Amino acid sequence: MAKLALGGGPRNSDNAMFALLRAALALLGTTFVLVALLYSGYLNYTDLDGPDIDVPAERFEVSESGRELHYGRSHLARDGKLWLLHLEGSPEQIGDARGRLSARLFEQLDELVAARVDARYGAWLEGWTATMLTRWDYRDADRHLDEVYRRELAAMAQAMPEAGGGRIGAYHRLFLYQSFDSLVSRLDDVIVEGAAFAVSRKRSAAEPGNLLIGRSLWFDIDHDEAPDRIVSVVCLDGRYPFVSVGWAGQIGVVTGINARGIFVALDPARTDEPLEDGAPGPIVLRRVLEEADTLEHAVEILRAASLRTSGIVLVADGVQRKAVFVELGARQREDHRVVRGEGEPVVWATDHMLREAFEGDLQNDWVRRYTSSGYRYERLGELLSQAGDVDPAELVSVLRDRRGTKGADLGLGNPNALENFAVAQSVVVDATAMVLWVAEGPSALGRFQAFDLSRLLGRTDAPAVPLDDLPPDPLFFTEEYRDFIEATGAITHARKLLSRGYPERALGSAQVAHALAPDVGELHRLLGDIERELGHRDEAIAHYRRYLELVPGRRREQVRVEGIIAELEG
């Protein structure tokens, strides 16, 4: 009773509570420290660190016009709407020059990619989880690069350390850019697509025609978001020089030709095979250009390569006037490294494999049936079968084709069309005469600028022969195209209004877009969202169904839309 009267009991109880609280806080703090240590250890374990290099700084010069930059033996110039990058020297010198000359262009590309990633992974946890899984899957992945390429990549990273950030170093981030083909294959949606074809027709029984090549690569981006197009001339000491068409920060090749007239182009593909321990496809294609002097040698390199993921490669030889496709599974098995098109005057491919080894592959079958690949393959076959004595201008018209199979009207911007207004690069090559035409953009609509490959690659010292550029698509100057551009602006405006809680006003802006360009798939996705918000069930379902018809290949978004339709109908 005395203790209770003096307050001893409650004080002891308070002390016990404080002790328990202190113990809980200590446990929480210890747990936090352990988690932080484990997280830091995970990041360190999965970091990619390039080799230590020492590159002497070169002199940096800017021309009076500001359109040309020089750094050592290398230089970068703007030519019309294209960039021409000339790189020369050792791996370290080339990497250093690439980083210093194209740093601004890479920053613009990186911001574009970051915005698309943020849009895809809107939830913080989902984005963080994807990042952690990617780090794990690509731990030590650079060990499969030749030391030459590791040193070049390290020099580029050292030249632009700003490429790092977000707990990832510049070397690590730049390596992932080289691995874009395997990164995009991890996604549910198909966001990079390609098409390539080659035509070698005889002019007469005694006179063989030149080998002509067409190639386009599509990114899932808005019409006005395409990265700057760079034509790179790479002269690595002791290797064949080559020209590639790509973007900033890319040391590998997706489209290119070397001084021996060997051309390669990579179309992304998907198979049931998991990611393997191997090199990125663009790095392997670069090795082909630097080492191969015949079509047979190029095919041999591809079939023997250790690859990280699957791909379809067009290999062409301008001297022999021959072209084939090599369908490459990630696993290094003879039946999964197959050649097709041997001896055929016309060959073409999109993003699905055709040979027997891949007929039962579920992923490959899904790409063929549910993305635009199968449809574009059929349309290419129609166009190329109708071609007579083809010339570069006719191949450009194929790349700009906006119709469907049997000439069906698809409307502007349809993903099934060869010209769907999302082309990131489009080229035509005369591999025999060694002339390259590159589309300036937007998409494949702009002028195709001509380049003399013999001069770029040092095959001749003769005076330059004037080459004719191929003119822009007449559509580029029409009201129809202007309407499409206005429609995309109205869609953006409507989307912002809906996100701010103004569905009635958003509907008005979306209706303007629909009147201007009624067959834009994203517009019907947006109209479905607006009508659903306004409680207009039937109208929302109709727009959602139209979206599914117009936009193939986006499996993730298609599942969401199908779920919304089921909910509205239920």
Image: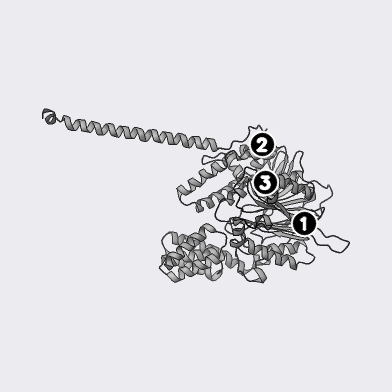
Type of the residue with mark 1: Glu
Q: Nearer the viewer, mark 1 or mark 2?
A: 1
Q: Earlier in the sequence, mark 3 or mark 2?
A: 2
What residue occupies the far right of the structure in this picture?
206
Label 3 crowding class (10 Å Cα cut-off): few <14, some 14-19, many 20+? Answer: some
Numbered marks: total? 3
Residue nearer the viewer, 511 or 129: 129
Q: Earlier in the sequence, mark 3 or mark 1?
A: 3
Asked which secondary structure carries label 1, the reply is loop
Asked which secondary structure carries label 2, the reply is helix
Q: Earlier in the sequence, mark 1 or mark 2?
A: 2
Q: Is any atom of residue 334 visible in this view?
A: yes
Type of the residue with mark 3: Gln
Placement of the N terminus among the 4 image quadrants: top left
Residue at point 63%, 34% (across, down): 51
Residue 332 badge: 3
Residue 151 badge: 2
Q: Is residue 169 above or below residue 372?
A: above
Placement of the C terminus among the 4 image quadrants: bottom left
Q: Mark 3 and mark 2 in contact? Answer it, CB < 8 Å.
A: no
Residue 401 badge: none
Choose top left, top right, bottom left or bottom right for residue 70: top right
* Residue 12 rendering spot, x and y as whole percentages: 20, 30
* Residue 178 rendering spot, x and y as whole percentages: 63, 45
Mark 1 and mark 2: span between their CA atoms? 37 Å
Q: Nearer the viewer, mark 3 or mark 2?
A: 3
Q: Which residue is mark 1?
A: 342
Mark 3 and mark 1: span between their CA atoms? 21 Å
Label 1 crowding class (10 Å Cα cut-off): few <14, some 14-19, many 20+? Answer: few
Q: Is residue 172 left or right of residue 94?
A: left
